Image (cartoon, helix red, strand yellow):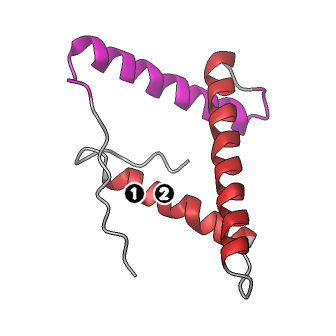
Amino acid sequence: MKNDRKITLSMPLIDDKLRARLAHGARLRAGIMEQIERGEEPAPAYRVEWLRETAKEIVLLVARRGEAFNAAHPDDGFSLADALDSVASARTILMSLAPRGLKDSGA
């Protein structure tokens, strides 16, 4: 059964100020990836902490949904593969909401 709920994100008007903030964030993300590749502790700390906390919340949500799945379907079992599939599906949905021409960071 297909879920036909349409997902939309509220996007602010992209003006010069927001464009500069987004470019700054892109530079910080690139720097963090380089630091990780070199085996360094990534910085700036506020951005890394936000990423870690957000990732933890996503993992906890997936785990709760898995527990609910197990409770609702005693003949079936939620697995790590299912968790990974759900996160991959969420990433696909997010990328489908991106403006045309946006490059995938591959992260």
**Does 4 sit above or below residue 93?**
below
Q: Position of residue 82 (x, y in %)?
A: 65, 71
89 or 32: nearer the viewer: 89
Res 68 quadrant in image: bottom right
Q: Which residue is mark 1?
A: 93
Quarter location, residue 76: bottom right
CA–CA distance in space, label 1 to label 2: 5 Å
Q: What type is the residue that disc 2 sits on?
A: Ala
Q: Position of residue 8 (x, y in %)?
A: 29, 46
Which residue is located at x 68 percent, y 20 percent? Answer: 43
State which quadrant residue 54 falls in: top right
**Residue drawn at (33%, 15%), measured in percent from left and top?**
20
**Element carrying mark 2:** helix
Range of residues picked out in magenta: 12-41
For the residues bearing labels 1 and 2, Cβ distance under 8 angstroms: yes
Q: Is residue 54 visible?
A: yes
Q: Main secondary structure of the magenta part?
A: helix
Position above or below: 30 against 20: below
- Residue 37: give x, y in percent of width and height: 70, 39
Query: Which residue matches tag 2?
Result: 90
Is-magenta flag for residue 67? no
Residue 60 placement, left or right of 25: right
